[in-house]
């Protein structure tokens, strides 16, 4: 990978051979592996998001913290559905 300066931004310029190799590797990944990678990325996102919320809201309750994480991590419609489903089941 090479780096190129465009205006004020520095962007990665991918080489065609590297790009082709990456595509070949992704095509070999099983559905299970894809799900595991996606789940790991989601968990990493939560790890990054979780500590930023109490920084802004130091007195936040654990329940509200979970709700804020859902709001930050999930698409709006899905976050609302997850919150509604949780409310129907009652607090855990």
Image (cartoon, rainbow, N blue to C red):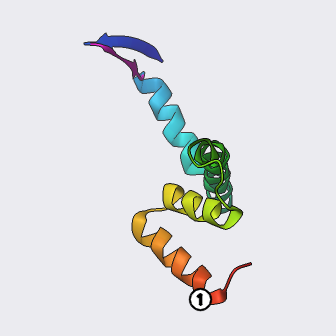
- Decide which of 69, 9 is in the foreground and name it: 69
Q: Is residue 80 visible?
A: yes
Query: Where does label 1 land, which residue?
Result: 88
Most extreme residue toward the right is: 92
Left or right: residue 6 versus residue 15 is left
State the residue lying farthest toward the front.
59
Above or below — where is 77 with respect to 88?
above
Q: Where residue 86 sits in the image (x, y, percent)?
A: 61, 80
Give the x, y percent position of residue 36. 68, 56
Query: 22 above or below 42?
Result: above
Tell me the residue at 48%/78% (across/down).
81
Q: Is residue 78 above or below residue 21?
A: below
Residue in front for this viewpoint, 83 or 28: 83
Between 33 and 56, the one nearer to me in the picture: 56
The x and y percentages for residue 20 are 46, 33
On the question of residue 31 being in view, the answer is no
Along the viewing direction, whichever of 40 and 56 lies nearer the viewer? 56
Residue 92 lies, in percent from the top left, at 74, 78
Categorize mark 1 by other alpha carbons within 10 Å: few (<14), some (14-19), many (20+). few
- Main SS of residues in magenta: strand
**Element under label 1?**
helix
Q: Name which residue lies at 70% across and 62% down.
A: 62
In this rendering, the count of numbered labels is: 1
The part of the image, by quadrant, that contains residue 76 is: bottom left
x 61%, y 41%: residue? 55
The quadrant where residue 64 appears: bottom right
Residue displayed at 59% across by 83% down = 87
Provide the residue span drawn in magenta.
Answer: 8-14
Location of residue 51 (image quadrant): top right
User: Is residue 54 a member of the stretch shown in magenta?
Assistant: no
């Amino acid at each position: 990978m090479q780096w190129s300066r465009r205006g004020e931004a520095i962007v990665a310029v991918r080489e065609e051979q590297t790009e082709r190799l990456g595509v070949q590797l992704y095509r070999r990944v099983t559905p299970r592996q894809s799900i595991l990678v996606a789940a790991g990325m989601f968990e990493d996102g939560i790890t990054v998001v979780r500590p930023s919320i109490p920084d802004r809201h130091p007195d936040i309750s654990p329940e509200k913290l979970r709700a804020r994480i859902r709001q930050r991590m999930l698409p709006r419609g899905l976050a609302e559905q997850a919150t509604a489903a949780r409310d129907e089941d009652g607090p855990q």
